[in-house]
Image (cartoon, rainbow, N blue to C red):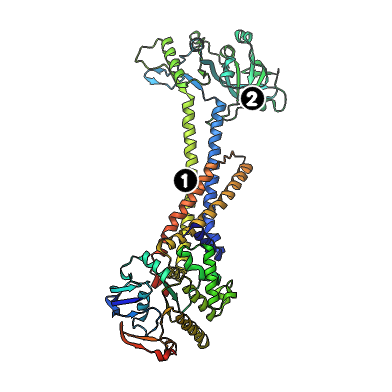
Amino acid sequence: MRIGALLRIALRALAVNKLRSALTMLGIIIGVGAVIVMIAVGAGAQARVEEQIRALGSNLLLVMPGATTAGGVRMGFGSASTLSEEDVAGINREIPEALAAPALRGSAQVVWGNANWSTVIFGVTPEYLDVRQWPLAAGRSFEPAEMAAAAKVCLIGATVAKQLFGSADPLDQSIRIKRVPFTVIGVLEVKGQSLMGTDQDDLILMPIKTARSRVLGSASAAKQRSVGTIWVKVADGIDTRHIEEQVRSLLRQRHRLQPGADDDFSLRNLQEVMAAQEASSRVLALLLAAVASVSLLVGGIGIMNIMLVSVTERTREIGLRMAVGARTRDILGQFLVEAVTLSLIGGLIGVVLGIAASLAIGNYFGWRIVLSGQAVGLAVAFAFVIGVFFGFYPARKAARLNPVEALRFE
Amino acid sequence: MLIHTRELVKLYRMGDGEVRALDGVSVDIERGEFVAVMGPSGSGKSTFMNVLGCLDRPTSGEYVLDDKRVSEMAPDRLAAVRNRHVGFVFQHFNLLARTSALENVELPLVYAGVAKKVRLRNAMDMLERVGLGERAGHHPAQLSGGQQQRVAIARALVTQPLLILADEPTGALDSRTSLEIMRLFQELNRQGMTVVLVTHEADVARYARRLLHFLDGRVVEDERNEALAA
């Protein structure tokens, strides 16, 4: 018997019990819809993570000073100041594919008029903005003369601008950082949250020399040229791992470390950190889809249930079909096609509702939604497989009926 | 010879014991015969019909239908034999509900793999032959009992089978309609169709030209009665 004939029989049988067919389909509709929504939301979250990575700059290396040991007590990374401005200059000179920028970190209370705010201070060089790929929303960057003279100028992050100035224009205003007056020469663009959830816009940048002498106040002569961290941007198209090794060996050489000795700094490849982050968001997306497919499975059980009822109800019909010449595979095919028709129609309706729901969720919550043909195809294919899987047992039960007993069935 | 059975035995397992529904039945039926199978309930006449119709296989013994040893065929081959060579008529018609008379008649041809156009033409021819040409589009619920049984007979005839097997075909009909149906069988038989019918009513059986009496799974009397057929 051809598939077309089987399909017609199936559609007719389903049309006889419209409400029942619709309710049975509902399980598959909800299942497929849920799978599509979950994949869309998961893929959206993943896309957002990827976007953040791009915003941060995935081709970044972060060098932090090593740990100190004080009386056998080992401190964490960053407790020693083993990195210097000479290291930064060395990297920029020796490794042309890399752009290094130092940062010296501290915190301070800042005041403008009668507003005040506690924020993070970074002493940096103009390269810092290039390395972090962080443009200015207004104003200008530091000039070489200002760098050399430890001028009292600063760039403020969007959060600081909002907290101190509200709607006023911060440019050329004088603010006090630890009681030292500074002129605001620029405002940074909004960068948003970091992957760890901290507000990246809550900061003030100033020339590193200014920070060292006026704000962070480390007077020790030995630390005159030391820096807190070094950011290294790797040129596009260059393998960050390759540059990572070059930076490592250059710093070891500069710090005169014996072969076999531990690094006195720590080097992090942000790309690898991001890759891990991305992998975890992918796992989350997968998990969401898996949970949604459980409801698809439940929908499949609903189909099996209704098909078993249908086989019992139509025992005499099955007997008659066998009497007029239906073979085992004709009966098997008839009920299998019926189950698959239920699941596929349900699946298609589920696709439509799932897409609609995804768009609605994206609109309502402002979440990023990514709909893909692949996900839709997967959901429909899954619905088909569910139909075959859960339709097979009832269909086989029908096909195995004894015609004599089936005809006599009341 | 159309039907040839030798020592047919059918055993049913019933709880601990066994029931011998057929206990050595040997019957030959020629083409063109009109046979009525009679006997009290439990005498094995229905089992005999099921075996003749290839719905059921004998436990032992031999059944040859049109020179083919049917008793040893696999289920799917039996389905093909039922499809092509046997036409069934049941007591309760067994028409598909919510399906037109024409589509009901067409059903065996669907399983025979006949093309749609040919199917519809043959089905229509058969409906006209039983006098229901203008009811082709009606559903069973819109037809009287007698009309439904005519549709069932058209369905049995549509594949041009070797024989018609009718199991109590008038059991659900009133006496006047029964008469019409029996006349139809008689007419078909006169045109050369072999008809075997099961009944427990002597009134119905008298249309046949041969009577097989069953008792306890055996044929106890094989009576040829040309006079009754007149």
Chain letter of mark 1 equals A
Residue at the far bottom in the pictured view: B227
Q: Pick the residue in front: A191 or A206.
A: A191
Instruction: Please state which amino acid type lies under the numbered disc 1.
Output: Ala
Indicate the position of residue A320 as horizontal and vertical percent values: 45, 71
Give me the residue at 49% from left, 25% from top.
A270
Q: Is disc 1 placed on a helix, strand or loop? A: helix
Indicate the position of residue A35 as horizontal and vertical percent values: 52, 47
Q: Pick the residue in front: B68 or A282.
A: B68
On the question of residue A215 being in view, the answer is no
Chain letter of mark 2 equals A
Indicate the position of residue A350 as horizontal and vertical percent values: 56, 51
On screen, residue B226 versus residue B216, left or right, reads right
On screen, residue A122 versus residue B45, left or right, reads right
Q: Are marks 1 and 2 in contact (CB under 8 Å)?
A: no
Mark 1 vs mark 2: which is more N-terminal?
Answer: 2
Estimate the spatial distance between the alpha carbons at disc 1 and disc 2, rounded to whole Å. 39 Å
Q: Pick the residue in front: B171 or B15.
A: B171
Q: Does A370 sit above or below residue B40?
A: above
* Res. B57 image quadrant: bottom left
Label 1 crowd (10 A; few <14 / some 14-19 / many >=20)? some
Quarter of the picture containing the N terminus of chain B is: bottom left
Label 2 crowd (10 A; few <14 / some 14-19 / many >=20)? some
Camera-nearest label, 1 or 2 = 1
Give me the residue at 48% from left, 41% from top.
A286
Indicate the position of residue B42 as horizontal and vertical percent values: 35, 82
Determine which of the numbered discs, if any, sits on residue A290 in the image.
1
Q: Is disc 2 placed on a helix, strand or loop? A: loop
Q: Which residue is mark 2?
A: A189
Quarter of the picture containing the C terminus of chain B is: bottom left
Instruction: Please state which amino acid type lies under the numbered disc 2.
Output: Glu
On the question of residue A306 being in view, the answer is yes
